[in-house]
Image (tube, rainbow, N blue to C red):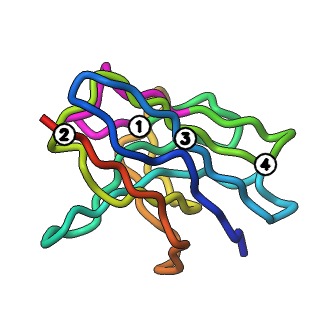
Amino acid sequence: QVQAVESGGGLVQAGGSLRLSCTASASTFDDDPMGWFRQAPGKEREEVSCISYNGGYKYYLDSVKGRFTISRDNAKNTLYLQMNSLKPEDTAMYYCAPVWLRRSATEIKACGPLAADWGQGTQVTVSE
């Protein structure tokens, strides 16, 4: 079971950038596909981005493609989300978690959380 702690959120103006980090406790981190999720008030949690265990495959929600970049450092048991050109609609609580992947030979088609076991998250607020 991966226990994750998210950090790096904050208040930023539209067009700004933030880098989220997720530090995981499990010794098997480098075997686990991981993902970032977000939940805005009154909305369902959605997957933002997912990455395969070695970083070779990545998935992005359409609305964040070209603006967000997911990466991981398995030596540090850490997952990252670089968020650029932030928009007010990116405002949400962001979470990381181990994920399942549905893949083709060349890309991740879909991803989702392995379990409903969420950390405290990190709040991202983007002002106009």
Q: Position of residue 125 (x, y in %)?
A: 29, 48
Q: Position of residue 35 (x, y in %)?
A: 50, 51
Q: Does label 3 or label 2 sit earlier along the sequence?
A: 3
Q: Which mark is residue 127?
A: 2
Asked whether disc 4 touches disc 2, contact meaning CB atoms under 8 Å apart, the reply is no
Residue 27 is left or right of residue 43, and the answer is right
Q: Which mark is residue 51?
A: 3
**Residue for badge 1:** 59
Q: Does label 4 or label 1 sit earlier along the sequence?
A: 1
Residue 112 falls in image quadrant: bottom left
Question: For the residues marked 4 and 3, what is the alpha-carbon distance in whole angstroms?
Answer: 14 Å
- Tell me what residue is drawn at x 75 percent, y 35 percent: 73
Question: For the residues marked 3 and 2, what is the alpha-carbon distance in whole angstroms?
Answer: 28 Å
Q: Amino acid at mark 4?
A: Asn
Where 105 falls versus 49 (above or below)?
above
Q: Does label 4 or label 2 sit earlier along the sequence?
A: 4
- Tell me what residue is drawn at x 41 percent, y 53 percent: 111
Where 70 falls versus 77 (above or below)?
above
Asked whether disc 1 touches disc 3, contact meaning CB atoms under 8 Å apart, the reply is yes
Residue 128 falls in image quadrant: top left
Please report the bounds of the magenta region as a residue range: 60-70
Circle 1 crowding by C-alpha within 10 Å: few under 14, some 14–19, many from 20? many
Q: Amino acid at mark 3?
A: Ile
Q: Which mark is residue 20?
A: none
Residue 74 falls in image quadrant: top right
Q: Secondary structure at mark 2?
A: strand
**Residue for badge 4:** 77
Q: Is residue 62 magenta?
A: yes
Residue 1 is left or right of residue 38, and the answer is right
Outermost residue, bottom direction?
116
